[in-house]
Amino acid sequence: MSELEQLQQRDIPAGRQVLRDHHCNLLRVADYCESNYLQASDKRKALEETMALTTQSLASVTYQVSSLATTFLRLLDLQAAELRKVEADISLRSPQRVDMHKEKVSRREIGSLTVSKRFLSYQKIMSPPNPPSLEPYYRKPLNFSVLDDIGHGIKVSPGLGGGSHRGEGASHGRWGWVRGWGEGGGGVLPFCVTKWVMMAP
C-alpha cells in the first residue's frame, strides 16, 4: 500500500474518529465541571480544577486537530505530486499517441482501398446476326489527268509545240511548267497564265 492510499484509507479516517471522541469527552468534562462547581464547598478549588481540565481537554483537541491538518496537507502534497507526474506522462505520450492514432487511421484508409469492388454489369458487344456484305478490295490505278480541266490554265495538247505555249517552261520527267498568253477582248491587254501540268511523252 502506498503512502497516499494509507493516508486516504487509514490515517485521516482515524484522525476524524479521534476528534469525534474528543467532542464527546469535552461534553462529559463540561457536565462534570458544572456539577462539581455546584456541589463543591470550596468554590475556588473547584474553579481551579475546572480550569485545569478545560486546559488539558482543549490542548488535546488542538493537538489532534493539528495532527489531522498535517496529515491532510501531506495528502494534498502527494496528490499534487501524482498530478504533476500524470501531467508529465500525458505531455510526453500525447504526441506519440496522436501519431499512433494517425497511423491507425491511415492503415484503415489503405485497407479500405484493398477491398475488391464489384463493377456494374453492362451489355456485352455482340456481332449483328446478319452482317452487311462488303465489296472485295481491289486496287484502282491513279488518274493523274483528272484535275487538268480545273482552273484557268491552258491545256497543252501533245501535238502542240513552240515557245509561246511551252517554250519558257522546263519539264522534269513527265511534269513541267507551262506558260501561255491569252488574248483579252474588248480592249483588255493580253495576260500570262502559268500552270503545272503533265507533259506528253
Image: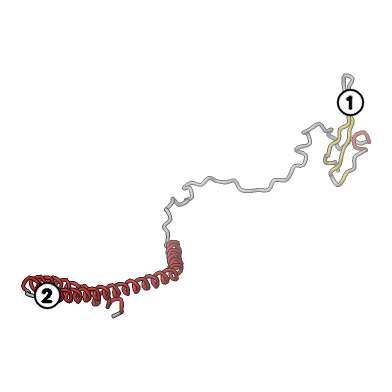
**Circle 2 residues within 10 Å: few <14, some 14–19, many ≥20:** some
Measured in 3D between alpha carbons, the distance from the residue under mark 1 to the one under mark 2, in whole angstroms, is: 168 Å
Residue 11 visible at all? yes
Task: Please state if 171 lies on the left or on the right of 35 as rendered.
Answer: right
Q: Position of residue 121 (x, y in %)?
A: 42, 53
Identify the residue under disc 1.
Answer: 183
Task: Please state if 37 lies on the left or on the right of 185 as rendered.
Answer: left
Q: Position of residue 115 (x, y in %)?
A: 42, 62
What residue lies at 87% left-to-right and 46% top-to-bottom?
172
The label on residue 46 is 2
Which quarter of the rendering shows the C terminus? top right
Task: Please state if 176 lies on the left or on the right of 37 as rendered.
Answer: right
Mark 1 is on which residue type? Glu
**Quarter of the view holding residue 104:** bottom left
What SS does tag 1 mark? loop
Question: Which of pointers 1 and 2 indicates the residue nearer the eye?
Answer: 2
Q: Position of residue 130 (x, y in %)?
A: 48, 46
Instruction: Looking at the picture, tell me which residue is in the foreground, 67 or 80.
Output: 67
Residue 13 visible at all? no
CB of mark 1 within 8 Å of CB of mark 2? Answer: no
From this view, report whether residue 81 is shown above or below residue 161: below
